[in-house]
Image (cartoon, grey):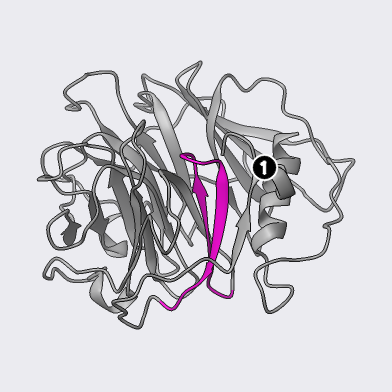
Amino acid sequence: MFLRFLTFIWCLIAPITVLPMCNLCDVAQIAYIPNSNQPRAVAFFNSTTGPNCLAIANQGTNTVDVYSVDCNNPQAEPIRIVTLDSTTSKINNPVGVAFSPSGCLAVANKGINPTGTDNTVTIYSIDCTTPQANPLAPAITLDNTTSKILFVSSLAFSPSGCLAVGSGLTDPNNSAVAIFSANTIDCTNPSTTPPAPTVMLDAATSKAFSVNAVAFSSTGCLAVASGILGLQGGRVTLYSADTLHCNTSGPTPAPTVVLDSTTSMINLPISVAFSPNGCLAVSNSGNNTVTIYSVDCATESAVSPAPTTILNAAVSGIKNS
């Protein structure tokens, strides 16, 4: 059922027509994975040379399961490749998973310490062709001090391999997103010490705070969904790939576009996703809608765009988004 839901959401933002809507998708369940325990996040790695990898973050068991999945063969059962655990793998309350373009797996570990000092992002070298009998140790660990990982809420890789890590910290005076260059988080050539971010997105200049979700477009633009849970409003900020300083350190970037709570109808955004042609979908938990935009985050604009499409409970059956 969960796989069907993901496919339906993808159908909504796939570039089938000029507007970010499409015809009904041909959805069929090809696999059922029964042993997940309170799955919080999932991520696919679509390999061009081997099987696809599926990572599932299980908060109930404090683990991350990685499977080999053949989406084109309904008869092929998913194969468990490895289970990342809390001891060897250092999994600690996983809230997000993401694969890099080269297949490295990053896990956002929110931890259990109320001060956030046990927050980490652990990165693993995964081979989805060979099952592992034992848990893997992280190749790289982004920590609370050098890497500035604090109250981690989300993470995403850019097409070039840069990593954005969002912080759910509600203090607007602290940085909200840490950007890491691809060469410092390469699991095949790991750094011996925790890397520092090349740039930090903050509330003052970058207009990002209490981050709930981050996502990259196919051209490397970054969307950041900000909003304090339980409060109305919030915003989604967009940043040009040219200003993110993925490869070298640079100044804190300002957003090129800001989606606001008035014109853009943002209302406590908790998830964002780009289509291949750059359409942006935002899940608004404040009013149970999904708003879709045609945006160009490479061009600076002082005007907040209105949504091109609004999915709601009355028309689209959106509930508790």
Q: Vertically, is 12 above or below 256? A: above
Q: Residue at x 32, y 63 (%)?
A: 182
Asked whether residue 54 appears in the rendered view, the answer is yes
Q: What secondary structure is the stretch in magenta mostly built from?
A: strand
The image quadrant of residue 22 is: bottom right
Q: Viewer-proximal residue, 118 or 234?
A: 234
User: Label 1 crowding class (10 Å Cα cut-off): few <14, some 14-19, many 20+?
Assistant: some
Going 72% across and 28% down the picture, which residue do you hit?
A: 33
> Which residues fall within the magenta stretch?
277-296
Which quadrant would the N terminus be assigned to in this image? Answer: top right
* Residue 218 percent across, percent down from the top left: 50, 71
Residue 32 horizontal side relative to residue 308, left or right: right
For this rendering, which residue is in front, 283 or 144? 283
Q: Residue 297 in the image: x percent, y percent?
A: 38, 75
Q: Name the residue that disc number 1 marks.
A: 313
Answer with the quarter of the image where residue 171 lies. top left
- Residue 46 seen anywhere in this rendered image of the structure: no
Name the kind of residue labelled 1 in the image.
Ala
Give the tally of numbered discs: 1
291 part of magenta stretch: yes
Q: Is residue 136 left or right of residue 56?
A: left
The picture places residue 225, in percent across and down from the top left corner, at 37, 51
Q: Position of residue 99 (x, y in %)?
A: 48, 51
In this view of the protein, which residue sits in the foreground, 110 or 83? 110
* The residue positioned farthest toward the bottom in the image shown: 299
Q: Quadrant of the C terminus?
A: top right
Image side of residue 276 versus residue 197, left or right: right
Q: Residue at x 70, y 35 (%)?
A: 2
Of residues 303 and 253, the one nearer the viewer is 303
Furthest toward the right, the residue is 75
- Circle 1 SS class: helix
Residue 248 placement: quadrant: bottom left
